Image (tube, helix red, strand yellow):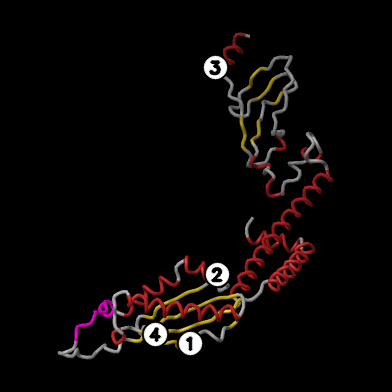
Amino acid sequence: MDLWDLTRLLLRRWYFAVPMLVATVAVVFLAAQSVSPDYKAMGYVQIIPAQSTGKEAEPNAKPRPQNPWLDLGYAALGNAVSLTVTDPTALEKLAEQGYSDSVTVLLNERTPLFEIEVVGDSKQQASSTVQKVIELLQKDVAAKQEQYGVQKQDTITTFVINDGSNPVQDGGTRKRVLIVAGGLGVLLTTACTIALDYWLRRRARLKDGGDDKPGGKAAGSAVAGLAPSAMPDPAEQTQVIRPQPTPNGKSYNGDNNRRMEQPQERKQQRPVSGASPRSDAPVDATVVLPSPNFQTRRHQGRSQ
């Protein structure tokens, strides 16, 4: 069954398919109303270079501990911090504390800038989660430098640009629910319509003659039920032509036009299945003639 046949079937059973589609739309609408919307909050934190960056060291100053993150670059520090904050263990702790665990932290290496995205069940949850993640980022940036004894003037700091206090409604979850529910509804409608069409056709066949019974009316009219184009053409049937008897007991062979004697008592010949009399054979029909042994019958005729 291709797409055109399926469309014709749905149009033929419109009285069943249309109510099913209406019911599907109602179910999808109710499902969309039952799903609570999500809220998305965005936060941005800028990495600030150390105060001593770009300044020449004083010749008489005491040597200070070197900050390795200055040599590695701000991108290395930012990637390390973002991986620590978005670790599955850290997200589980956030969820246990009532925050959202749908947290994404990206680092824009050109600036460098932390981009924080949080999806929560409410505005309050989304906003508070962004602020909590910013706090964790600031603490981790400082902790990763303090372990090397870096002094204040050589420490990389952060600056909060946006703390996510203005979350917006996110309809992504509701859209996904609508798409899935609508697709399932269409598939269910199509499957039910096909099943109904099959059941109605089967009941009609059983009512006409009981095609499930051996020797029933439907089974006997299998050939009659064929389309006219599917019936065999009489001109293409194989015809069997037998020698025609004459009143004096002789017969003529139509192939060689020789006269041959026939016994007085001829056995009754049964008609061949699918054959028709010679007079009814079409002009372009295939004719099968007997192949008698002319030499043997010639000797028999002479001996008689």
Q: Earlier in the sequence, mark 2 or mark 4?
A: 2
Contact (Cβ within 8 Å) of mark 1 with mark 4: no
Give the Cα distance between marks 2 and 4: 25 Å
Q: How many numbered dots are placed on residues in this image?
A: 4
Q: Is residue 149 above or below residue 275?
A: below
Report x, y in % for residue 151: 29, 83
Name which residue type carries label 1.
Asn
Q: Nearer the viewer, residue 234 or 103?
A: 103
Give the Cα distance between marks 2 and 3: 108 Å
Q: Nearer the viewer, mark 2 or mark 3?
A: 2
Contact (Cβ within 8 Å) of mark 1 with mark 3: no
Q: Please name the residue shown 43% across and 84% down the image.
A: 45
Q: Nearer the viewer, residue 68 or 23?
A: 68
Name which residue type carries label 2.
Ala
Specify the segment rendered in magenta: 62-72
Contact (Cβ within 8 Å) of mark 1 with mark 2: no
Q: Please name the residue shown 80% across and 46% down the image.
A: 205
Q: Give the residue at mark 2.
A: 95
Contact (Cβ within 8 Å) of mark 3 with mark 4: no
Quadrant placement of the N terminus: bottom right
Report x, y in % for residue 171: 61, 77
Q: Is residue 284 above or below residue 267?
A: below
Q: Earlier in the sequence, mark 1 or mark 3?
A: 1
Q: Give the residue at mark 1.
A: 162
> Which label belongs to residue 295?
3
